[in-house]
Image (tube, rainbow, N blue to C red):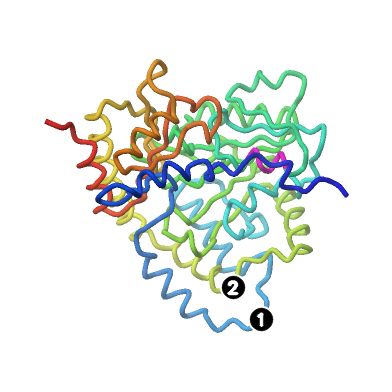
Amino acid sequence: MSAPVSGRLPDFPWDKLTQYAATARAHADGIVDLSIGTPVDPTPEVARAALTAAADWPGYPVTVGVPEARQAVVDWLTGTHGTIELDLDQVLPLIGSKEFIATLPSYLGLGPGDVIGFPALAYPTYEVGAALVGATAVATDSLTSFGPETPKLLWLNSPSNPSGRVLPTAHLKKVVDWCRERGVLLVSDECYLDCVWEGEAVSVLHPDVCGGSSEGILVVHSLSKRSNLAGYRCAFVAGDRSVIAELLAVRKNLGLMMPGPQQLAMAAVLGDEAHVAEQHERYRARRTRLRAALEGAGYTIDHSEASLYLWTTKGPDGPDCWQIVADLAEQGILVAPGAFYGAAGSHHVRVALTASDERIDAAVARLAPRS
């Protein structure tokens, strides 16, 4: 019998936080959990109303997605983010973005001998996807580091999880051009495109980046953070028509279908920007208070111009990420070690903004200098 699939995968990183979580929970005022970026604010009424209205759905949904949902995606990409116009057959709904990121290499038929590239600081699931198929994973921010081993698949993530870094338009265009010259499929994880605090973030499907064509490009978006829909598992992939067609053919055979009511909820929230602006302001206020408290306690915030995290350190000569995790756990604050996201994060921690105002205020009070 062959070895189980789990043996090919890296350790699940969050299991390593168990002892620190126990320390934080022992705090007299309870834990402030800033480790996982899961939304805590209410699901917007527009989503709940749409889900309720569509609740009577006795038949199977379709993998390709209902036209209303795909049209909403097209309208949102062009109307909100200025991308090129897509047709409906260039959009595919997903059951959350994580399942897609982890399984995309298998859909593409990648395996041993193939190279998959992703950022030096990266969401761990890119590496999981490579490990599942036995491909070679390369974590790098330099295109020249691939040498003669041209990747079959290259992931981008701007705005970045965990660092909040936003890649400029000129750099994105350079990556698109490089991939097209070599026949590399470029997939841009843009789940935080609506969570920008400083400057501007653009999609790789913006005409200034892609030159008016989606050839060789996919973008992945999630409504989990934008619209507090993590529990609904609403996401989508869009871009190159031929790649989308191949993904659809595979996913139909696997029975991967976003539930119908969720498809209509996704359409509704993509057509409503008011709840996005309201949630954005909640996060902005939390970010302002938490950043000031961390800096007042001697921490430095790097990047963090976007996303829902503060990329926090005491410098390359200061304590490593695990010591920072331990120090904050003693104050009842749980954060994620930067090492979860690659060796480049060894002296940083990721501090999430996804906690209630009351818990953010508790963290701020605990970080205040003692007189």
Asked which secondary structure carries label 2, the reply is: helix
Q: Is residue 309 magenta?
A: no
* Magenta span of residues: 126-131
For the residue pair 43 and 292, the one nearer the viewer reads as 292
Say if 256 sits above or below 296 in the image: below
Amino acid type, mark 1:
Gly
Q: Which mark is residue 59?
A: 1
Label 2 environment density (alpha carbons within 10 Å; few <14, some 14–19, many ≥20)? many
Which amino acid does the dot numbered 2 rest on? Gly
Query: In the image, 362: left or right of 233?
Result: left
Check residue 127 for magenta coloring: yes
Q: Earlier in the sequence, mark 2 or mark 1?
A: 1
Q: Is residue 292 left or right of residue 192?
A: left
Place of residue 61 in the rendered image (x, y in percent of width and height, measured from the top left):
65, 73
Front residue of 96 and 82: 96
- Disc 2 designates what residue? 260
